[in-house]
Image (spheres, rainbow, N blue to C red):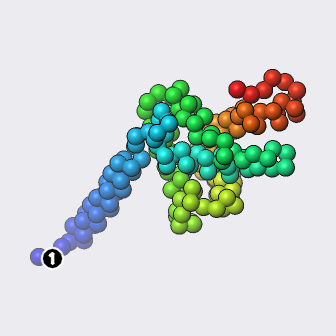
Amino acid sequence: MALSRRQILALGSMSALVGGLGGAAVVTSRWWNPPAAGGFAYLAATEAAFIRALAGAAFPATADIPHSAADLDLDHFFDAALRHLPPDQRKLARVGLHALDALPMATTGSSFVALSGAQQAQVLEAWRTHARPELRQATSSLLVVSGMGFCTHPTVAPFFQAWHRCGYGR
């Protein structure tokens, strides 16, 4: 039986569709609403690790503030912030964390969490200045929440209090 050109194109389209559905099934099973890790109301362990890594890349220890955001448990701050989102938006935000963690695999072969601190900082800067507004906005949103947690953390707030001479902190 000889296949026509139209039948071959249809089979090719079906294989792409099946592949896409398989990829969607993997994303759904791994990324859509995994159970919360111990100590968290919403975040899974991989999501919390991504938040810590992202915060550490955005707010490293400096001479002025000798504390890295990676060491300040900002994942708990982010987890607490998630309770203010409706359930579907909370799930989508968590899917976004997984997607961003996996995004560097295309160029580096590693997830964001597995990269070195210098590589994480480079990837974060690339996201912050990316041509796609959706990626820039997602990155900015995460940086705003992480920055709020960092600046108001009891260990860091005294530095900002001294600079701004105001009531500052949580």
Give residue 167's quadrant in the image.
top right
| Secondary structure under the numbered disc 1 in the rendered image | loop
Q: Residue at x 55, y 49 (%)?
A: 49
Q: Position of residue 44 (x, y in %)?
A: 46, 43
Q: Residue at x 71, y 34 (%)?
A: 153
Q: Is residue 15 above or below residue 89?
A: below
The quadrant in which the C terminus is found is top right
Q: Is residue 137 above or below residue 90?
A: below
Q: Is residue 65 above or below residue 170?
A: below
Q: Residues within 10 Å of mark 1 (few under 14, many from 20)?
A: few
Viewer-side residue, 87 vs 45: 45
Give residue 88's quadrant in the image.
top left
The quadrant in which the N terminus is found is bottom left
Q: Is residue 38 above or below residue 27?
A: above
Q: Position of residue 61 (x, y in %)?
A: 76, 49
Residue furthest out toward the bottom: 2
The amino acid pointed to by label 1 is Ala
Q: Residue at x 50, y 36 (%)?
A: 39
Is any atom of residue 104 visible in this view?
no
| Residue labelled with disc 1 | 2
Q: Residue at x 21, y 67 (%)?
A: 7
- Relative side of 129 to 82, left or right: right
Q: Position of residue 150 (x, y in %)?
A: 70, 38
Is any atom of residue 81 visible in this view?
yes
Q: Position of residue 3 (x, y in %)?
A: 18, 73
Residue furthest out toward the left: 1
